[in-house]
């Protein structure tokens, strides 16, 4: 898969784009930060798309490895505690340039891959319910890992 073999771009290659709404391919629900929180550590989850700022995201490098920044909080999407484990939750934190805050979107599969863990962002258990947390898992090209 492209996202697990790509190398991180130089800082000068980064550009900003967005805001985007990330809709899950399985549930059709949008990626957001729980409760419109602006706090570090607030969990990422899925919810019915409603156009709110907490469901909008900016990308520092839409064509390569880059950060995904929440429009409401200005914080970066990351994997909690720099975990490399399957099932580790996604949350937001002050942007700090760490690999756990770098993502690559594979336009062919829709997968969002994490540079630190080399795993893909997905909805836990393939749920289609509001409020279900976003986690990472081995990339498998399933609809629950597809983001459009």
Image (tube, grey):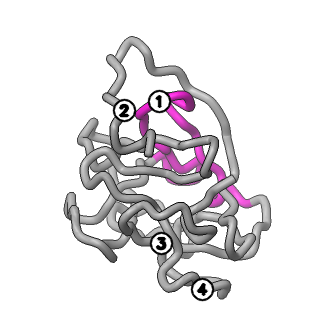
Could you tell me how far apart the alpha carbons at marks 3 and 4 are, in whole angstroms? Answer: 10 Å
Could you tell me how far apart the alpha carbons at marks 1 and 4 are, in whole angstroms? Answer: 28 Å
What SS does tag 3 mark?
Answer: strand
Q: Which region is colored magenta?
A: 52-74
Q: Residue at x 21, y 58 (%)?
A: 82
Q: Which mark is residue 127?
A: 4
Of 9 and 15, which appears nearest the observer?
A: 9
Can you identify the residue that label 1 sits on?
Answer: 64
Of 24 and 47, which appears nearest the observer?
A: 24
Q: Residue at x 29, y 72 (%)?
A: 86
What SS does tag 4 mark?
Answer: loop
Q: Which mark is residue 134?
A: 3
Could you tell me how far apart the alpha carbons at marks 3 and 1 are, in whole angstroms? Answer: 21 Å
Contact (CB < 8 A) between labels 1 and 2?
yes
The number of numbered badges drawn on the structure is 4
The mark that comes first in sequence, 3 or 2, is 2
Can you identify the residue that label 2 sits on?
Answer: 6
| Crowd band around label 1 with a 10 angstrom C-alpha radius: few (<14), some (14–19), many (20+) | many
């Amino acid at each position: 898969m492209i996202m697990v073999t790509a190398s991180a771009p130089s800082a000068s290659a980064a550009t900003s784009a967005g805001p985007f709404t990330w809709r899950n391919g399985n549930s059709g629900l949008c990626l957001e930060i729980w409760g419109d929180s602006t706090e570090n550590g607030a969990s990422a989850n899925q919810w019915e798309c409603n156009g709110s700022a907490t469901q909008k995201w900016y990308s520092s490098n839409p064509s390569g490895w880059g950060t995904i920044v929440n429009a409401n909080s200005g914080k970066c999407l990351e994997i909690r505690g720099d975990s490399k484990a399957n099932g580790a939750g996604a949350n937001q934190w002050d942007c700090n340039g760490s690999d756990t805050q770098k993502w690559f979107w594979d336009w062919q599969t829709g997968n969002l891959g994490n540079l630190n863990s080399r795993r893909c962002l997905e909805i836990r258990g393939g749920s289609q319910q509001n409020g279900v947390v976003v986690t990472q898992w081995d990339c498998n090209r399933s609809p629950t890992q597809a983001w459009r």
